[in-house]
Structure formats: C-alpha cells, structure tokens
Image (tube, rainbow, N blue to C red):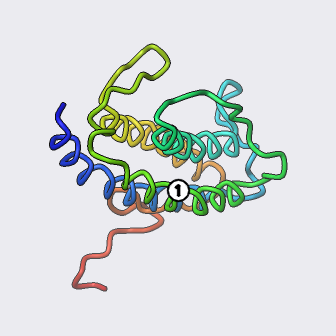
C-alpha cells in the first residue's frame, strides 16, 4: 500500500470511527445501572463486562496506533467502575482526544504493515476498519441485552421501537 492510498483510506475511516463512537456511547449510556450484572447466558459477559470490553478495545486500538505497535496490557476494568455510565464516561473522555492524535499520524505510518499478535500483518490504516468491525460486533451484542434488562434500545442504523426514525419533514 502506498502512503497516498493510506491517506485516502484515512479520510474515510477516521470520520467513520467518530460517527460510530457516538452510537457506541448512546448504547453504553442506555445500560441501566442496576442491571450491570445481567447476562443472557452463564457463558456470556455481563452487561458491565461487555460495556468495558467494547469501550476499552476502541481505546486500546488507538493507543496501539499511537505506540506504533499492538501489545496486550492489563485490560482489567478499573475497580471503581460500577456501571456502564462509568465506562461511558471513560470512553467519552478518551476516545475523541486519542482519535484526534491518531488522525495526525503521517501517511507513511498508515501504509506500514503493523503486526497484530502474529495473526495479521496489515497496513496500519486497515486496522481502523478492524477496530470498527470489532466495535460494531460488540455494540450489537450489548444492544441486544438492553430490552431484556428493561432498557430502551437507541436508534443505531435507523429507528428502533424505542426511538423510531424521524423523517426530516417531521422534525
């Protein structure tokens, strides 16, 4: 991949990460504080564990770009986090700033292959799509927890029962 190709892809992926992060934040904020232990199956993450995985993985990818390498550090949720609102606050406080820093990395960085745990060795820019796929997958899982927990499901890619689509003429 050339630097020009990577720079072009960056103009697509960075705005998409910003858009998707707003939706992720809405899903995180929809998790009821008193239902953080909910899990649909004994083998499933609890709502709080899944919220943490979703949010922390996005930040982990951004930190990896800034470090120029992906390393698995301690991914334990901070002990003082007791609700998805705590996770949402962490996500909101960190994502935008780090994404702005990541967007400033030079095109040559984005064109350079970056290993990921010996499984992938893709040009760095392609991990933004990987990050999006991961986030969208786990956000979908978490959103499927919401209604059984008694919460409202926010609009994600169009309306939901709880937040129907509004046509521009109805606004």
**Vertical position of residue 42 compared to residue 106: above or below:** above
Q: Residue at left 26%, top 35%?
A: 111
Q: Secondary structure at mark 1?
A: helix
**Vertical position of residue 159 compared to residue 2: above or below:** below
**Vertical position of residue 120 compared to residue 20: above or below:** above
- The quarter of the image holding the C terminus is bottom left
32 horizontally vs 9: left or right = right
57 horizontally vs 100: left or right = right
Q: State the image coordinates of residue 129 (x, y, percent, origin top left).
A: 33, 39
Neighbour tally class for label 1: few under 14, some 14-19, many 20 plus, Cα within 10 Å? many
Residue sticking out furthest to the top: 118
Q: Residue at left 45%, top 40%?
A: 65
Residue sticking out furthest to the right: 80
The total of numbered circles placed on residues is 1
Q: State the image coordinates of residue 121 (x, y, percent, origin top left).
A: 35, 20
Q: Residue at left 42%, top 39%?
A: 131
121 horizontally vs 96: left or right = left
Q: Residue at left 44%, top 38%?
A: 137
- The front one of 102 and 32 is 102
- The front one of 150 and 102 is 102
Q: State the image coordinates of residue 164 (x, y, percent, origin top left).
A: 38, 68
Quadrant hosting residue 157: bottom left
Q: State the image coordinates of residue 161 (x, y, percent, origin top left).
A: 43, 62
Quadrant hosting residue 76: top right
Residue assigned mark 1:
95
């Amino acid at each position: 991949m050339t630097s020009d190709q990577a720079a072009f892809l960056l103009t697509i992926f960075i705005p998409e990460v910003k858009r998707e992060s707003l939706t992720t934040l809405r899903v995180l904020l929809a998790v009821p504080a008193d239902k953080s232990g909910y899990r649909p199956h004994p083998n499933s993450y609890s709502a709080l564990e899944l919220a943490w995985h979703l949010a922390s993985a996005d930040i982990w990818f951004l930190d990896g770009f800034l470090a120029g390498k992906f390393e698995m550090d301690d991914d334990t949720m901070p002990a003082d986090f007791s609700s998805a609102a705590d996770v949402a606050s962490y996500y909101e406080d960190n994502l935008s700033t780090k994404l702005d820093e990541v967007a400033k990395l030079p095109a040559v960085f984005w064109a350079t292959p970056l290993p990921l745990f010996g499984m992938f060795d893709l040009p760095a820019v392609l991990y933004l799509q990987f990050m999006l796929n991961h986030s969208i997958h786990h956000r979908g899982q978490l959103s499927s927890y919401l209604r059984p927990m008694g919460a409202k499901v926010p609009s994600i890619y169009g309306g939901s029962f709880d937040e129907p689509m509004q046509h521009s003429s109805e606004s």
